[in-house]
Image (spheres, rainbow, N blue to C red):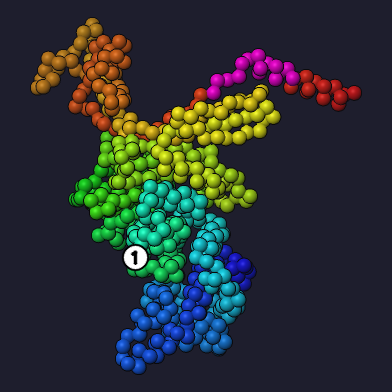
Amino acid sequence: MIWQVADLLRGDFKPAEYGRIILPFTVLRRLDAVLAPTRAKVLKEKEKWESKGIDPMPFMEKAAGLKFVNTSDFTLKGVLGDPDNLTQNLSAYINAFSPAARDIFDHFRFTEQTDRLAKANLLYLVLEKFISFDLSDKAVDNHQMGQVFEELIRKFSEASNETAGEHFTPREVIRLMVNLIFAEDDSLLTPGNAAVRTIYDPTAGTGGMLSVAEEFLLDHNPDARLTMFGQELNPESYAICKADMLIRNQDVSNIRLGNTLSDDELADYKFDYMLSNPPFGVEWKKVEKAVRAEHDKLGYDGRFGPGLPRISDGSMLFLLHLVHKMRPAKDGSARFGIVLNGSPLFTGAAGSGESEIRRFVLENDLVEAIIALPTDMFFNTGIATYVWVLTNRKPKNRKGKVQLIDASSFWQKMRKSLGSKRKEMGEDDITLVTRLFRDAQEAQLATITAADGTQTREVVMKGAEPPEGPESGKVRLAPLSRIFRNEAFGYQTITVERPQRDEDGNIVLGQRGKAKGKPVPDSSLRDTENVPLNEDIHTYFKREVLPHAPDAWIDEDKTKIGYEIPFNRYFYVFEPPRPLEEIDADLKEVTTKIMRVLGELSA
């Protein structure tokens, strides 16, 4: 319905510009509709306290039950009632909002857009259209309104060939992440517990992650309160996020505009919960100077002490940023979920920035679980993605361990693709993954194929008997949940040297300094070996190297510790090829059919 406003703009505005008009007007109509029921009470409070020379704002906000008001004598409908002074009256109406709400329209450059509409003789028509929409919170709840904003942004992004995925995360992915970060906190979810917690998103977008988290918590415990914090780089997304927070009665001063990596606007804050979907595979060259300066100057006292990833992908910088923002365990601890692509699992050799970041979070026992999502889940990419869950309050049964869950097969096909998004996780899928995480046990997935080819699936927990295959059918077992010790992901890269030899085949010895009398290494024969962290390098060297190169030795000064998480390797299931007899029989059957068809054609 709202998208139809684009028909009015066609011709006077380019498709890429539709969003600059429709988004702020949608926000404006929403705020106007939300304030309508308490409007008379608010204006009454204004008159009462202004006559006494007292700032009426706190009393007006109390009357509205919100952290913003509009003190204008106009409503949007009233603005429309005076067409000759439409631009001036609309401007006066906007300026009558509380500062926090006015700031939203400043970031939309609303005055600039209304001037353009007025010059095109479209302002009246557009405003009239929006006034006809019932966007009150009774007609459209906050959850639906968030989806409205996201759908509009997706349409505008398609029209302008921008990336919709930069602005928001699919709702079912957010629901899964929210389930995971709250899964082990029984006391918080218990009705009647008036707990207050903080939640933070450093890449807030339109605020979807924050709002879904609040809805989840209030559904389970209406007495709990979640104070939301966030930072967003895109001004329009920031404006929408701020509008959503206003309507939710959140303190919008907690939502900041700016680049989180180069300018952390909430530098002094620590949080109970955090969620983030940073951009995948985006280089961080623009903020390189600030990030390297913090890394070099502050080290581990800053955010980026453990290491810096390659310049082509800054997503692991957000991982470090969130680790730094965790509330210390002594003050209550923290848990967060972050969506990353496959690269942070294994990119980078021992000693590289990526490996050192993995080493830091694993050796400090922060990684609780990593969940593989289905491909084609996001609007702007079809690549494999993973949810990392980190905490500094691991329960006893998880200490020193990491759980890997392969949820890549838990999806259903969408009726209509949205960009690159062709799949979605259903509620049953989300519940199953949450249960696997909460149980913290190993499990397998049994795929049962009947004789007619129909398939059913069953989760087999560790220790349970797998189902028996049907007659003429089969059962295929694949790992679903696996648990590893942290050190299982670590390795030592040893440098194996072999000596130079002269023309007669004799070993060349060093002549000076520390190398005097020792074999000179031949760089052309130099090699490296990765030795599991829990194995002695000399035992490995003796078993794996010396039988093939008796003159080799380890250059101990070059040994480095590395960490990688080869996720797919742990879930790979080898399927032997079919017997040749079966393949031959199939080929003969197909050949026979082809010859019969050819015979019928020539008859």
Residue 453 is left or right of residue 92, and the answer is right
Is 577 contained in the magenta span?
A: yes
Residue 531 is left or right of residue 13, and the answer is left
Q: Main secondary structure of the magenta part?
A: helix
Placement of the C terminus among the 4 image quadrants? top right
Q: 121 or 304: nearer the eye? A: 304
Q: Residue drawn at (27%, 59%), measured in percent from left and top?
A: 269
Can you see residue 88? no
Q: Residue drawn at (66%, 33%), measured in percent from left and top?
A: 454
Q: How many labels does the image show?
A: 1
Where 329 falls versus 344 (above or below)? Answer: below
Q: Residue drawn at (54%, 85%), measured in percent from left and top?
A: 78
Residue 556 x, y percent position in the rendering:
20, 24
Is 51 contained in the magenta span?
A: no
Residue extending farthest left = 513
Residue 276 x, y percent position in the rendering:
39, 52
Magenta span covers which residues?
575-589
Where 438 falls versus 104 (above or below)? Answer: above
Q: 22 or 18: nearer the eye? A: 22
Residue 277 x, y percent position in the rendering:
42, 51
Residue 335 x, y percent position in the rendering:
34, 49
SS at mark 1? helix
What residue did someone put label 1 on?
Answer: 254
In the rendered structure, which amino acid carries the disc numbered 1? Asn
Placement of the N terminus among the 4 image quadrants? bottom right
